Image (cartoon, rainbow, N blue to C red):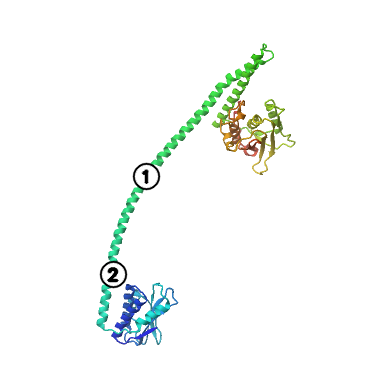
């Protein structure tokens, strides 16, 4: 773009001025202008006297970002002094290429992205370099002095800015330390509160355990204490109604029947309470053995035969031509199914209560499915989970005149879980309810375990 020959010290002074003007034209910062001018001035003094020494200013528009390129070319003479090259390399990017006939040094300065196009930058450079760069040594000294003063002033301003930033940083650090101290104190307070809460929760847990144990002991003790007098009431009422007993008037017989009915209800309640207490306390032992499902179903039909109006409600049980094998606690299984069937019969006014038995299609673990389906009143969807709570009963007109404690389903699920199974309900109001009991075959699980002495089946 523009070339200058260097043959006298005045040419070097002009080179420095041209370098500053070119740097300003391409929007380099003040410090970069001084560094570029100083680097060119030092390299020009070092190369002064070389044959054919020439300096060319140009733009590399292909670089990203664009760069100002100054090239020193000469022939003959010694190579550049290492000290000079080291000084120039500290100020700008420099590349030295020594050849047999001609050598050159290329200085590259990246340009800031100020939005100017390559053509516009070429125009700026051409304009400032067209006037030449002649100056005297005094001009160069004055320019260097101005640059030094400007640099010192800029350094002083930077020092002031650095001092101010250090003060702000120290103030920020003090704030951070204060905040850290406050947060640490709050965290310690929170931790103390959490520890206190954990301690309180442990105390509450222990109190709940003790209350649960006390409740279980109370149920067990009161049930045992009540069974003897209740059994006596039931037995005496049975004797009074026996044919061998003195004849009773119609009113007396009704009263005795009422006593017997109430005694049976109270005895069932006492037995349920005792069983629930023993199950919660873990005192119900499991005695797995092969179960003959045909005999079990016949036993259930005998137990439930007189407990419902057979003209209005049909109790349907499977024939089991090929009964699936099952190893479980037969006594507990009878209690579960009796509760489910009794509950279905109690809340079915007309239709049928059906018990189905099938092998679970899932391959492992092997299990048997017992399904009790009725055509009763059904259970509202919102009540399905709550019916398994102890003593909970779905309130409504259907409860009128029907005895019950609300323990049946809770007790059935407890025994089911004790046997490793699951009990679920599905129901539609006005259509009926389906109870699904899934019991695993305990034969392969408990075959090698020693049988526990004693029995928990002491109804």
Quarter placement of the N terminus: bottom left
Q: Position of residue 292 (x, y in %)?
A: 70, 33
Q: Position of residue 228 (x, y in %)?
A: 58, 20
**Residue 79 seen by the camera:** no
Locate residue 143: give its quadrant: bottom left
Q: Which class describes the residues within 10 Å of circle 2: few (<14), some (14-19), or many (20+)?
A: some
Could you tell whether 257 is left or right of 223 in the image? right
**Residue located at (42% from left, 39% from top):** 197
Which numbered tag is attached to residue 175?
none
Quarter placement of the C terminus: top right
Please tell me whether residue 417 is drawn above or below residue 251 in the rendered image. below
**Residue located at (30% from left, 57% from top):** 170
Please tell me whether residue 433 is drawn above or below residue 146 in the rendered image. above
Q: Position of residue 181 (x, y in %)?
A: 33, 49
Which numbered tag is attached to residue 188?
1
Q: Say which element carries label 2.
A: helix
Q: Which residue is mark 2?
A: 154
Q: Which class describes the residues within 10 Å of circle 1: few (<14), some (14-19), or many (20+)?
A: few
**Residue located at (60% from left, 18% from top):** 233
Foreground of the two, 361 or 65: 65
Q: Say which element carries label 1.
A: helix
Q: Nearer the viewer, mark 2 or mark 1?
A: 2
């Amino acid at each position: 773009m523009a070339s200058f020959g260097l043959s006298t010290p005045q040419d070097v002074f002009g080179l420095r001025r041209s370098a500053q003007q070119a740097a300003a034209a391409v929007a380099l910062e003040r410090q970069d202008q001084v560094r570029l001018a100083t680097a060119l001035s030092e390299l020009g003094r070092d190369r002064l006297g070389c044959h054919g020494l020439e300096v060319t200013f140009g733009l590399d528009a292909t670089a990203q970002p664009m760069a100002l390129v100054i090239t020193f070319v000469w022939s003959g003479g010694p190579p550049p002094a290492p000290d000079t090259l080291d000084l120039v390399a500290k100020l700008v990017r420099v590349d030295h290429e020594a050849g047999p006939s001609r050598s050159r040094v290329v200085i590259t300065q990246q340009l800031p992205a100020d939005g100017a196009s390559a053509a516009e930058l070429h125009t700026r450079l051409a304009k400032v370099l067209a006037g030449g760069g002649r100056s005297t040594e005094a001009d160069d000294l004055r320019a260097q002095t101005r640059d030094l003063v400007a640099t010192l002033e800029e350094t002083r301003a930077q020092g002031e800015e650095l001092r101010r930033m250090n003060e702000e940083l120290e103030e920020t650090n003090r704030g951070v330390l204060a905040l850290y101290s406050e947060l640490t104190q709050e965290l310690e307070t929170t931790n103390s509160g959490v520890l206190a809460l954990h301690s309180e929760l442990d105390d509450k847990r222990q109190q709940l355990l003790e209350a649960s144990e006390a409740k279980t002991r109370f149920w067990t003790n009161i049930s045992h204490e009540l069974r003897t007098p209740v059994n006596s009431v039931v037995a005496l009422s049975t004797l009074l109604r026996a044919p061998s007993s003195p004849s009773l008037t119609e009113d007396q017989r009704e009263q005795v029947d009422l006593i017997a009915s109430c005694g049976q209800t109270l005895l069932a309640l006492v037995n349920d309470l005792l069983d629930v207490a023993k199950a919660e306390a873990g005192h119900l032992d499991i005695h797995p053995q092969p179960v003959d499902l045909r005999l079990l179903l016949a036993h259930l039909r005998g137990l439930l035969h007189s407990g419902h109006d057979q003209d209005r409600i049909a109790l349907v049980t499977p024939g089991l031509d090929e009964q699936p094998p099952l190893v479980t606690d037969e006594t507990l299984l009878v209690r579960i199914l009796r509760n489910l069937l009794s509950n279905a019969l109690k809340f079915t006014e007309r239709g049928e209560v059906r018990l189905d038995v099938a092998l679970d299609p899932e391959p492992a673990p092997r299990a048997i499915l017992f399904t009790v389906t009725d055509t009763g009143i059904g259970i509202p969807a919102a009540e399905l989970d709550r019916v398994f709570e102890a003593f909970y009963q779905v309130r409504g007109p259907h409860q009128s005149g029907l005895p019950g404690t609300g323990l049946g389903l809770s007790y059935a699920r407890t025994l089911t879980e004790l046997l490793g199974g699951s009990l679920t309900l599905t129901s539609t109001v006005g259509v009926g309810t389906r109870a699904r009991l899934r019991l695993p075959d305990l034969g392969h699980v408990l075959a090698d375990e020693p049988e526990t002495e004693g029995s928990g089946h002491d109804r």
